[in-house]
Image (cartoon, rainbow, N blue to C red):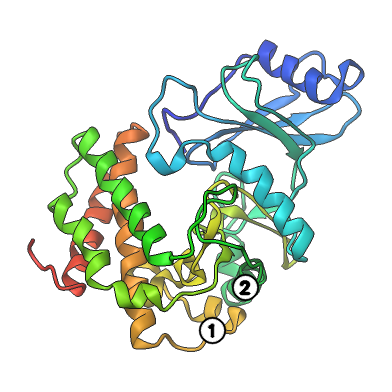
Amino acid sequence: MESITKNRQSPEVLRAMVERAYGPDRTPVGEGWVSELGHGWFNVAYRVRLRDGYQAVLKIAPPPEVEVMTYEQGAMGIEPAMLDLVAAHTSVPVPRVDFADRSRELCGADWFFMPFADGDNLDGENLGVAGPGPAAREPAAYKEQVGAANREINSVRGTAFGPLAGPGDSSWRRVFTGIVEDVPGDGERRRVDPGRVYDTVREVPAEHAASLDEVSEPRLVEWVLWDGKVIVRDGRIACLIDHERAFFGDPLIEVGFAGTRPAAFGDPTDFMRGYGHPPLTETEGVRRRLYCLHLTLVMVIETVYRGHTDPAQYEWARGQLADIMAQLGHAGR
């Protein structure tokens, strides 16, 4: 995926990064040892083959001169912390961090190396899958596995709601309201037209505060575990990747539940069966609409921050935002 947030580097800089991480004896020479992985939307990622044949992935944060949305600031530091939590407390397969550098000496941004996870993205995108991708061949089985893995991640308890590194808060309502309030500010700063009045969007969480107050225990959440972040091999999940948006919150905010309210995000039946979640209660349905309101607002505004030239995502998300606002009592406002 193309985005102005991708901090691409020359082969010389990439080689210097490999040497810092793995040492000169393993640093590749010649050509053909590096290729860009194209499925990411935010960070640039490279597949690197070391001199001894070891294959790694290098992820580089956006360049410092490129403005990102408020919640994306410092995202590169979140992923290593998330990987440590998942590896320590669950059996969910995630890569380890081989080396991380936050000095910003070589490329002006944070970066880290991890092992390359061999397999196919669940969505089959940009991996040369011949014919239907894995999700099309065995959709129910894979979605159930994703649901089970997501539940295991959500089983990790936190001491407070909010960012992995803190500061935290005992109130999910305060944390989520703050998360939502950041997004209209980002949109106003770049003059993005969401088709709604930003002040009205800001009011909605407070109108449904009782549903948010029902959440009392912070749980580790991925938030946007899309199919493209699921690597599969031999009928099983081989690895989950891209964890830079994790935080402690309400498990119902996970994107696997998005299709429950509204249906435009796809059928969640198999995910929920794998997760072991019963049909949503009325209050849970309200929260799920609030979470979709936040997600679609992000999807509208990020198209400007990432420099999208194709309007498809912007137009789709704007339409969904209007529908969700109507479901929350704000039709045409």
Q: What distance separates the C-alpha of mark 1 from that of mark 2? A: 9 Å
Q: Is residue 325 above or below residue 125?
A: below
- Crowding at dot 1, Cα within 10 Å, few <14 / some 14-19 / many 20+, comes out as some
Amino acid under label 2? Arg
Task: Name the residue located 37 percent from the left edge and 72 percent from the top edge.
Answer: 212
User: Does dot 1 land on a helix, a strand or a loop?
Assistant: loop
Residue drawn where x is 83% and y is 27% of the image: 50
User: At numbered mark 2, what does the secondary structure look like: helix, strand or loop?
Assistant: helix
Q: Position of residue 137 (x, y in %)?
A: 60, 69
Q: Is residue 213 left or right of residue 190?
A: right
- Asked whether the beta carbons under mark 1 and mark 2 sit within 8 Å of each other, the answer is yes
Q: Measured from the top left, where is residue 57 in percent x and y?
A: 71, 36
> Would you identify the image quadrant in which residue 159 lies?
bottom right
Near-viewer residue (158 or 304): 158
Residue 277's disc is 1
Left or right placement of residue 332 versus residue 297 in this view: left
Residue furthest to the top in view is 12
Which label sits on residue 151?
2
Mark 2 surroundings within 10 Å by alpha-carbon count, few (fewer than 14), some (14 through 19), many (20 or more): many
Looking at the rendered structure, the kind of residue marked 1 is His
